Amino acid sequence: MATKKTTTKKNNDGAIAVGIGAAALAAAAAGATYYFYGSKDAKKHRTAAASWAKGLKREVVKRAKTLKTLDAAAIAGAVDDAVALYENVRGVSAQDLKNAAKELKREWKKVKEEAAGTAQKTARRVTSKAKSAAKKVSTAGGTKKRR
């Protein structure tokens, strides 16, 4: 009896998709690099991107200060609230906003330190001003002129 040979066709669709994805990613990175460093308005583009990113971080820290507990979930909620404010801002792409939110959520401990550190600095400043005012009062009342 003769046996029948069957041939199987290999499917390379996954490898092709990965290759296309890598090429698209490289093109996007090259485009972003040109946008921020190569074009004649590059400095203006970098300044605009930095300004909204700093504003977003300030908003997250401001919201984190109002929270009772500063844990990962609470700070992630503060990030989501702040991102909602920036969704309709002109000049901020949805992808950039998503990346910034992801980074802030990943670095939640730094946001926590910044939110808590600001409160500690304010307390130190108030304490030092109170001490200096107390010194002024005690020295002003304690000196008498002899006649």
Image: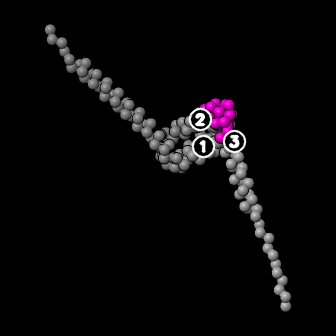
The answer to whether one can see residue 20 in this image is yes
Work out whether 51 lies above or below 12. Answer: above
Farthest top residue in view: 147
Farthest left residue in view: 147
Q: Which residue is mark 1?
A: 100
CA gap, disc 3 and disc 2:
18 Å
Looking at numbered disc 3 in the image, what kind of residue is underneath it? Gly
Work out whether 86 lies above or below 102. Answer: above
Looking at numbered disc 2 in the image, what kind of residue is underneath it? Ala
Q: Earlier in the sequence, mark 1 or mark 2?
A: 2
Looking at numbered disc 1 in the image, what kind of residue is underneath it? Ala
CA gap, disc 3 and disc 1:
19 Å
Residue sitting nearer the eye, 93 or 40: 40
Label placed on residue 31: 3
x, y percentage for residue 63? 53, 39
Residue at 71% in and 51% down: 23
Q: Which image quadrant for residue 19?
A: bottom right
